[in-house]
Image (cartoon, helix red, strand yellow):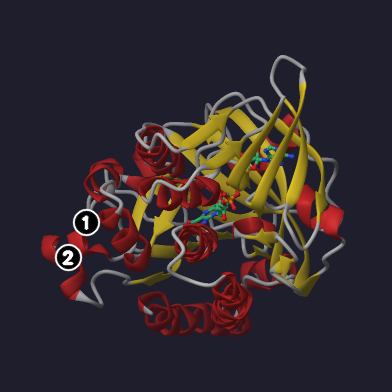
Amino acid sequence: MENHTSALIIGAGPVGLSAALELGRRGVPCTVVERHRRLGRRSRVAGVNKWTMELFHYWGIGDEIHRAALPFGATGPVTWKRTLAGETLGPIRRDASRPETWSPTVARAGDIMFCPSDAVESALLAAVRRCPSVDIHFSTRLRGFENTEEGVTAELTYGNGEPGLVRADYLLACDGINSGVRKMLGIPLDGMRMDMDLVAIDFEADLRTWTGERPCVAYWIINSVSCGCLVPRLEGPRWIYTAFRRPDAAVATEEWCEDVVRAATGVPTLPLRITDAQPRSMTIEVVSQFRSRRVFLAGDAAHRFLPMLGPGINLGVHDAYDFAWKAAAVWERWADPTLLDTYEPQRAAAAKRTSEHTAEFLRLMAETGISADVYDFATALEEDGEDAAALREMVRDAARKLEGHWAT
Ligand SMILES: Cc1cc2nc3c(=O)[nH]c(=O)nc-3n(C[C@H](O)[C@H](O)[C@H](O)COP(=O)(O)OP(=O)(O)OC[C@H]3O[C@@H](n4cnc5c(N)ncnc54)[C@H](O)[C@@H]3O)c2cc1C
C-alpha cells in the first residue's frame, strides 16, 4: 500500500492530535500513525495553561475539557510535608494569593486547569475524527523514513502486520520522550539532567482521612525513607507518587514501590494497590535543531522537562499549532514554503524561555530541600535542634517565594 499525504504525523499523544486537528479543521490531508491500539493508557494530571485553553476553545473543545477538569477551588494549595499524615513544612497559597483566579470567568478564559490527560486526548481525538481530511491509524508503527529536500517517504507497519509506504510533503515527529525519529536523525538534546532517578508510581488508595475531601494539588514529601511528589489523579482514589530514588535504593520492584508510598503517607499499614511504575529523570533538555529538511520535531520529541507539574503538554500543543497553521498556509498556497523556516527559531525561543523558567523553578525548589541531595536534607531535618529549625524556616520561606513563580 502506498499513499501520499501533506503531513504525516507520528504519535497520537496530545501533541500529534493537536497538529492533526489544526490541519484537519483547514481541510489539509494528513495521516496520523500511533503504535498503540488506543489512547490514554497512562493518564496523568495535565496542568493546562491559559494559552493552551485558548487554543482548545478556538478548536471547539474548550468546554469539554473544562467539564473534565477539576473545578477551581476543588484542590488545596501545594504543600511540603514530612509525610502526608505528618508534619506540614510549608504551603504555597497558589490560589489564595491571587483571588482573581477563583473567578469562574477567569477560569473559563483559562488559568491553569488540572485535567486528566486522557480527557484532553479523548476530546482532541473526537474532534480529529470529525475532520474528513485526517486519516488516523492505531496499532501502526513508523519503522523508518527517507528524508529529502522534496519530501519524506515513510515505512510503516500496520496493525495486521502489513507493511506500507507513505509519501508526505512533511513529517511531524510527535513520538514522545524517547522519539525514534529524533534518534534516527541523530539530533542530540542539550541541557541539564539532574543526578537523580525518579519512579512515577501510579497507585490506588483511600487517603481521605489525611487529605479530606479537598486534597492539595501536590504534596512534596521529605523524609529520610521516602522523598517525592504526591499528586491526586482527580478520579476516585487514584494517585501518582513520583518518588526520588535514594542513591542506595534497591531495584524498583512492586514491593519497593509499596514501601516508598507507605513511607510517604506515613501510614505503615495503608491498604494500597500499585497500578503502574515507570522510571523518570529530572531533565531540562531541548533538541539542538527542531527541523531536518522535511522532518519537524514537536512536543516531548523536541524537549524534555520535569515529569511532574511540568510544562510538557502546553509547550508541545503550541509546537503542534505553530507547525500546523504554517503547513496549512503552504498547502492552501497563501504562503511560500519558506514560512516553515520560521518554525525552528520560534519554537527554539519558546523552549529556551520554558527551560529558563523551569531552571529557576528547580533553583527555588532546591531551597525547599528538593534537589539531588534531598535525602541528606531529609535526614538533617529529622534531627532535633536549631539546625533543623533553621531548615524548616528555609522551607517555609522558599515555599513563599515559589508562590510568585507559580503565578507566572
Ligand atoms: C507523571 C507525569 C506528570 C506530568 N504532568 C504534566 C503536567 O502537569 N503538565 C504538562 O504540561 N505535562 C505534564 N507531563 C508531561 C506530559 O505528559 C507530556 O509532556 C506530554 O504527554 C507530551 O505529549 P506528546 O504528544 O509530545 O508525547 P506523548 O504523550 O508521549 O505521545 C507520543 C506518542 O507517540 C507514539 N509513538 C512513539 N513512537 C512511535 C512510532 N514509532 N510509531 C507510531 N507511534 C509512536 C507513542 O505511542 C505515544 O502515544 C507529565 C508527565 C508525567 C510522566
Q: Which of 395 and 156 is in front in this view?
A: 156
Q: Disc 2 versus disc 1: distance between alpha carbons?
A: 7 Å
Q: Where does residue 9 sit, x and y in percent of width and height? A: 61, 46
Question: Label 2 belongs to which residue?
Answer: 102
In the rendered view, tell whether residue 214 sits above or below residue 90: above
Q: Quadrant of the C terminus?
A: bottom left
Q: Which of 137 and 408 is in front in this view?
A: 137
Q: Quadrant of the N terminus?
A: top right
Whether the residues at callouts 2 and 1 have beta carbons within 8 Å, the answer is yes
Looking at the rendered structure, the kind of residue marked 1 is Gly
Residue 175 makes an appearance in the image: no
Q: Where does residue 339 sit, x and y in percent of width and height? A: 54, 74
Q: Nearer the viewer, residue 260 or 311?
A: 311
Looking at the rendered structure, the kind of residue marked 2 is Trp
Q: Where does residue 93 sit, x and y in percent of width and height? A: 31, 72
Which residue occupies the extreme top position in the image? 160
Question: Label 1 belongs to which residue?
Answer: 73
In the rendered view, tell whether residue 93 sits above or below residue 398: above
Q: Where does residue 228 sit, x and y in percent of width and height? A: 61, 56
In the rendered view, tell whether residue 376 sits above or below residue 199: below
Q: Residue 95, located in which quarter of the rendered image? A: bottom left
Q: As drawn, is 134 to the left or to the right of 351?
A: left
Which element type, helix, strand or loop, lies under badge 1? loop
Which residue occupies the extreme front position in the image? 333
Q: Residue 273, located in which quarter of the rendered image? A: top right
Q: As drawn, is 27 to the left or to the right of 222?
A: left
Of the image marks 2 and 1, the number of the one nearer the N terminus? 1
